[in-house]
Amino acid sequence: MIAGVIGATGYAGAELVRLLSGHPEVKGLSLSSVSYEGDRIEAVYPNFLKGVSAALDTAEGVIKNSGVVFSALPHGVGEDYGKFCMEKGIPFIDLSADFRFGEDEETYTAWYGKPYKYPELRSAAVYGLPELNRRKIKDLAAGGRVIIGNPGCYPTAASLGVFPALAQGLGGPGTVIVDAASGITGGGREPGRAFHYPECADAVIPYKVGSHRHTPEISRNFAAMAGGNAPALIFTPHLAPMNRGILSTSYIPLAESWRSRAVSGAPRPPGGEIEEKTGKIRELYAAFYRDEPFIRLLPPGTAAASNRVRQSNYCDISVHLDQAGTTLIVLSAIDNMVKGAAGQAVQNMNVVFGFDETAGLTAIPSLF
């Protein structure tokens, strides 16, 4: 199969090229880039020398030559290519937000500033978080035409961390707070001033506080995971001085049945009831994610960290309780360029075509 990548010279596009070049079911690549059309990918990214050699074609040329098409373009510009792919019966996997909200055009327009160009395409679209929608992805793909709205990086990390708690009724009344830190590649290849080295080195910087456009995506995921009732959400992203990775810390108020029997708000030293309840919650998480190939639930005493998932499609999760016994604290770590973008897109391709879901994604994380 020939895999096509539109926007192959952006960070996410280049990561797709890297991953697809080692995929056992991908026999060739067709690539496009508006900025570098006519050049070769290995001239733009010399790391591909002796590994990938391909001329950069037009987007239309990529679609004509490919059996699956990935779009790594900015939000609001990929619908034409999605329409073209649907007319040709080619699966279209979009890394922008254009197909993440299904038929909810109002929310998309409010947060991304554009209406849908082709609303009718949403009947063929599915939100591509496999751990949540694997069956829906397979069902749509069986019809021969499917558009995957690949999730955002922050929503992937936060949602996978919170999913078992919401699905199994651990969460109680109150607000779920998500604090997350991302590497600088999350800003894309053409960043603004805030992403320049002197601005972001040696600092952890919150941004878009209370207004980040991944907020409605996270909230919608939480609603689906909780059976329709979304908990209130506060989401605060931070820019961290690292190239790649996301660490998401989620604070989930516990349901009354899971709260400590001691007086609420009275901290106690580690051990005893707190340790026992943490162990039970961890067992629930382990059972929930037992068959998920890319979820790694960490052993007691080990906290999730971004450097341990670098260049991999894993999501590491660790569960903790506050010492008052009223709040579940979940740490989830992903590589924003892999499980948060290109790797998840390849995972979705595997689901669509019935390949082994781990195909092309089995690399052990690089710690250094």
Image (spheres, rainbow, N blue to C red):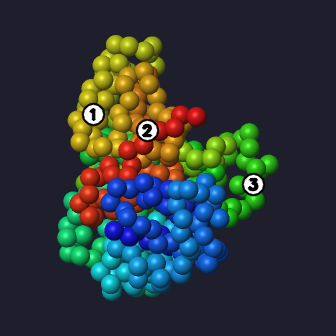
The amino acid beneath tag 3 is His
Q: Residue at x 35, y 33 (%)?
A: 297
Cα distance, mark 3 to mark 1?
Answer: 40 Å
Q: Is residue 98 left or right of residue 137?
A: right
Q: Tell me, yes or no, if residue 116 can be seen here.
A: no
Read off the residue under disc 1: 286
Foreground label between 2 and 1:
2
Number of the label disc, if any, that sits on residue 196: 3
Q: Quadrant of the N terminus?
A: bottom left
Q: Is residue 250 left or right of residue 32?
A: left
Number of the label disc, if any, that sits on residue 364: 2
In the image, 109 versus 348, the foreground residue is 348
Q: Position of residue 183 (x, y in %)?
A: 60, 47
Toward the right, the furthest residue is 198
Q: Sort mark 1 into few (<14), some (14-19) or many (20+) by Cα contacts within 10 Å.
A: some
Label 3 sits on a secondary structure element that is loop
Q: Is residue 199 left or right of residue 362?
A: right
In the image, 57 versus 71, the foreground residue is 57
Number of the label disc, if any, that sits on residue 260: none
Q: Residue at x 37, y 62 (%)?
A: 26
The amino acid beneath tag 1 is Ala
Sequence-earlier tag: 2 or 1: 1
Q: Quadrant of residue 7?
A: bottom right
Q: Residue at x 53, y 81 (%)?
A: 58
Q: Position of residue 147 (x, y in %)?
A: 34, 72
For the residues bearing labels 2 and 3, Cβ distance under 8 angstroms: no
